[in-house]
Amino acid sequence: MQRVDFLDGMRETVARMMHGGVFLNVGGEKPNAMTIGWGWIGYAWGKPVFVVAVRPQRHTHGILCRTGEFTVSVPTSQPLRAELAMAGTRSGRDVDKFAGLGLTARPAQLVGAPIVAECGLHYECRTLLVQEMDGACMSPEVLRTNYPEHDFHTLFFGEIAGCYRTRV
């Protein structure tokens, strides 16, 4: 494991979110991974922050609300396209995604959520704020193209407790 500054991995992380996604991982009774393509890395409240967007109907949403911790694992040496596609379409309510994807849930260093061992860049986060989105103040274009059914995301602002690279 090689610790890195959260900013050092930001460009790579954003590029992966834009082109195929990254894994958002939660712990609890049964570890779960889902694909995210939306997220923000920045600085708030004097802390490095990773913001992830999860719709309330997703299995991951309830786990995030209960545990208050998550990790984000970024594929680096291999794209993991098929795994990301499946993690984004199947529910953890119905299937053990790690076993079903042939991925390894490895314990994180600082939080209870696992990391995906097959990924080379990881963020470990503790939730600072949970904010439900509201369409009342949203651009009509964003509302029309992303939320025609008003199924708004919840934003989870996680303090980045650790960021590191692992060998894959």
Image (spheres, grey):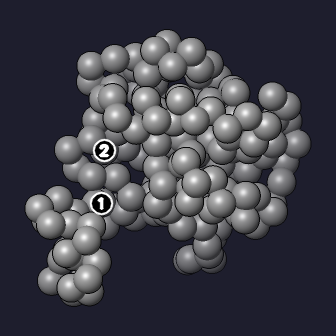
Q: Position of residue 146 (x, y in %)?
A: 27, 67
Q: Quadrant of residue 109?
A: top right
| Contact, mark 1 vs mark 2 (Cβ under 8 Å) | yes
* Residue at the extreme left of the image, as rendered: 149
The residue at 51%/36% (across/down) is: 84
Whichever of callouts 1 and 2 sits on the residue coming sooner in the sequence is 2
The residue at 30%/60% (across/down) is: 154
Q: Residue 155, relative to residue 100: is it above or below?
A: below
Q: Position of residue 95 (x, y in %)?
A: 34, 17
Disc 2 marks which residue? 61
Q: Secondary structure at mark 1?
A: strand
Mark 2: which amino acid?
A: His
Q: Quadrant of residue 61?
A: top left
Mark 1: which amino acid?
A: Thr
The residue at 43%/29% (across/down) is: 86
Which of 54/145 is in front?
A: 145
Q: Residue 6, relative to residue 64: is it above or below?
A: below
Local packing at callout 2 (Cα closer than 10 Å; few below 14, some 14-19, many 20+) is some
Which of 141/135 is in front?
A: 141
Q: Residue 156, relative to residue 84: is it above or below?
A: below
Q: Name the image quarter holding the C terminus.
A: top right
Q: Name the image quarter holding the N terminus.
A: top right
The answer to whether residue 161 of the structure is visible from this angle is no
* Residue at the extreme right of the image, as rendered: 2
Disc 1 marks which residue? 154
